[in-house]
Amino acid sequence: MADIAFLLLVFFLVTTIFTSDRGLLMQLPPKLDQPKQEIPEKEIMSIMINSNDDLLIEGERVESPELVASLVKEHLLNHGADPTLSSNPEKAIVSIKADRGTTYSVYLAVLDAVDQAYNEIYANKLGIEVSDWLALNPGGSGVERSMYNRAKQGFPRQVSLAEPTDIQKN
């Protein structure tokens, strides 16, 4: 009886598939062997989230992640009008830094808001709805590919995801 129980145990251990959490699947840019460049502070929009899920943009508290998209668009579309914001969309960087205690829902809401801002800029540049922009296939027909490339020209999606740290609670 013990032999049969042992064989069953081995059988189930061998045939069972153990799932593992993969985290957020994001494609990282290739590593470039270039010297570090100094980036002017005004080109970087800093978004920080502490362990209380308080959202700080450029050191000022923002009440909800829904406001992030409009602030990111304002930073990207400044074109040098406001000296505190980015002077050129090609140089603008959005930096997101979270505390280790930040909840996933708030972190993902901020990532989605930044993504929404870029998608709205691309759709407005083409004069189409955001849903139509999202339906475009960049690897598809020549028309869709040229629309996709035309929308992204001059507006590279430069989002920096900083390593989580312990940010002071407010």
Image (cartoon, rainbow, N blue to C red):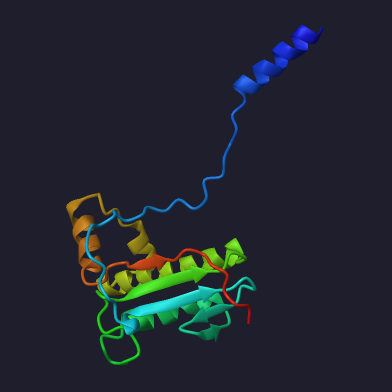
**Camera-side residue: 39 or 108?**
39
Instruction: Give the image location of residue 128, x and y in percent.
Output: 31, 69
Kindly identify the residue that appears in the image at 31 percent across and 74 percent down: 124
Instruction: Give the image location of residue 70, x and y in percent.
Output: 43, 80
Kindly identify the residue that appears in the image at 70 percent across and 11 percent down: 7
Q: As displayed, is residue 16 above or below residue 59?
A: above
Instruction: Give the image location of residue 54, x and y in percent.
Output: 60, 77
Kindly identify the residue that appears in the image at 58 percent across and 61 percent down: 104
Tally the numbered discs.
0
Q: As displayed, is residue 77 above or below residue 96?
A: below
Q: As displayed, is residue 21 above or below residue 98?
A: above
**Camera-side residue: 82 or 152?**
82
Kindly identify the residue that appears in the image at 25 percent across and 72 percent down: 37
Image quarter hosting the C terminus: bottom right
**Camera-side residue: 165 or 2?**
165
* Residue at the farthest right position: 1
* Residue at the farthest bottom position: 82
Q: In which quarter of the image is residue 121?
A: bottom left
Image quarter hosting the N terminus: top right
Taking the image as shown, residue 10 lies to the left or right of residue 146, namely right
